[in-house]
Amino acid sequence: MNIDKRLVRKDSLEKLFDILKRNSKTIYAPFTKNGKTTFRDTESFSGISTGYIQTSESSKDIAFPRAEKLLEYSKNKEGMTVKGIDINDIPEVILWGVRPCDAAGIGELSSIFNWDYKDEIFNNRLSRVTVFGFSCNKSDEYCFCTSVGGNPGNTAGSDILFTRMGDDGDYLAEVLTEKGLSVVSMATDLFEKSETSGKEKFLAEVQVRFNHEEIKERLSKYFESKEWVEQSMRCLGCGACAYVCPTCACFDIQDEAHGRKGSRVRCWDSCGFSHFTLHTSGHNPRDVQSARWRQRIMHKFSYMPERLSVYGCTGCGRCSRACPVDMNILEHLISIQEVTV
Amino acid sequence: MTDNLYMPYLMRIERITYEAPGVKTFMLKFVNEADQDKFSYKAGQFGEYSVYGVGESTFCIASSPTRKGYIECTFRQTGKVTNALSDCEEGSIIGFRGPYGNVFPIDEWKGKNLLFIAGGIALPPMRCVIWNALDMRENFKDVTIIYGARTVKDLVYKDELKDWELRKDVKLVTTVDPGGESPDWRGEIGFVPTIVEKIAPSSKDTIAIVCGPPVMIKYTFPVLAKLGFSDNSIYTTLENRMKCGFGKCGRCNVGKVYVCKDGPVFTLAQLKELPDEY
């Protein structure tokens, strides 16, 4: 659909919030506490964070929860009853305040969950989420969205993208999808016709630091490089990078039993963990941390582009911010571009 | 919700066969007949078997698709799930989802000799295709099966080995590792690659299917090469750790290749294209 550009007055956001609440919408918005900004279910507009460069964790868990039931079972005398999760139990949610790098990550997750078999649990969750993106007006040294095809005002993945025009200005609202339109239809007065052209001058500046096509090309001959060992020497294998990442989708499946009942649960996992690929026999195809680090980079910048035609990175930089030993993916990617193979 | 990819079929354990120490075969029937009716698979495919409350484990379907109405799996008791499976009794209900993965291209092999080489617990992933071929025996020329295990006790499918030994249209060679023989052992003694070299099957018009522990595979490929087998005429299966079975959970890939989607069946030529990460 054509992008519909509207003007939303700065004091109209709160009115919009209230209207959505009156329409019994569940809204997840970012709140800052003890230096961490996280999305949470909120009833009130006051206190929603605006000054964050990024939320501490990505918003992916709205469609791909960190632990989610796939099915429930109960054993009885007659046998066994197993039932899958009921999609009617999945709430409709408005995700408020998503940065463009996280919104773009939704598309990449979708590619993973739909490249062959269609994961309808993920799809159903996603279909119930309306994404309110908020463009970035500031960035930090970890940000590199522009190096992986994104930008601070990227519309991908958002249903409505709000761009604040100036520090204390009104918002340009780009209505991008049917879901976005249905929100507008609840509050037509707040979405005024806009004469505004160009949001670029209000966006953060993020310099392009490497060429992702070139990285992909180089990685195809890079598997045996010694650089992986150099880069991962200090990696603890803690998995923090995967947990904060908007596109990491690797998961584990575990059963939780409570007496004669229980459930099967899908939970986040990380290719950085030593037991991730460990066979029961004791054999481990990725038996050292450098092989696991290589998998992380290759998966995102080589295997995914080749198999799914998308990159597994939106340049949010969270993995570098979260790393307890200061590994920096941006530095590593730049060095891959510079090192002669 | 019907589109839940993670929803297993309920299966009743119809029969349990004790194969070897720690190794059992389950014959499984669908609890709901409607599931049975719409289920189909081909030789080489695998599934996720589960004990509710304990978890899922990945192994091949060991029975041939030519045998209708049930599936079989053979597993060794090693981890949490296989131990729980081993505790199950006939009549117990377990979960199964599948079939996943690619298949042995058995139709392309018509008119050729088949040479099966297996070691230890790797006969099960080959048994499906052996029976599949034997159930349409007229389509193939010579069928040779070379099977080895550590000791006589460790040989699986002992009854079927007897069947194959008696059949005139199958050449069966069994072997055990040196020291693994029993006083009445009449088969070969020696490691599988050595025995393959000794038997020296002809590579002319022959497809070789090799499954076994990595060390056996490693030393068998060069023997086959010496016998004149091309990389395209040698098939094997990879057995990486998996959770989902359909290309999402992210752990079975070898480079850009997903064992669950692009495998588990590979030719040696395909394996040589892969990075050494399996």
Image: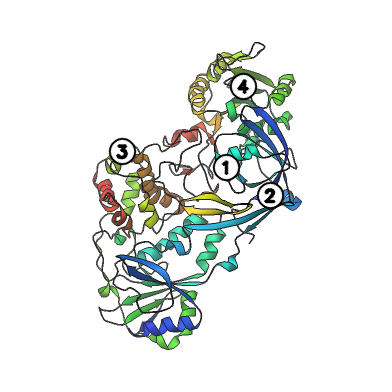
Chain under callout 3: A
Residue type, numbered disc 3: Ser
**Pointer 2: what residue?**
B10
Picture quarter with the N terminus of chain B: bottom right
Question: How many angstroms separate mark 4 from mark 3 (CA)?
Answer: 40 Å
Which element is circle 3 on? loop
Most extreme residue toward the top, as rendered?
B183
Give residue A232's position: percent from left, percent from top: 30, 43
Which element is circle 2 on? strand
Tag 1–tag 3 contact (CB < 8 Å)? no
Give residue B81's position: percent from left, percent from top: 58, 41
Q: Nearer the viewer, residue A191 or A37?
A: A37
Chain under callout 4: B
**Pointer 3: what residue?**
A225
Q: Earlier in the sequence, mark 4 or mark 1?
A: 1
Does A139 sit above or below residue B57? below
Chain under callout 2: B
The residue that appears at 72% across and 21% down in the rendered structure is: B162
Q: Which numbered disc, 4 or 1, marks the residue closer to the eye?
A: 1
**Pointer 1: what residue?**
B57
In this rendering, position of residue A99 left or right of residue A210: right
In this rendering, position of residue A55 left or right of residue A109: left
Residue at mark 4 shares a chain with residue at mark 3: no
The residue that appears at 73% across and 32% down in the rendered structure is: B135
Residue type, numbered disc 1: Ser
Question: How many angstroms separate mark 3 from mark 2 (CA)?
Answer: 47 Å
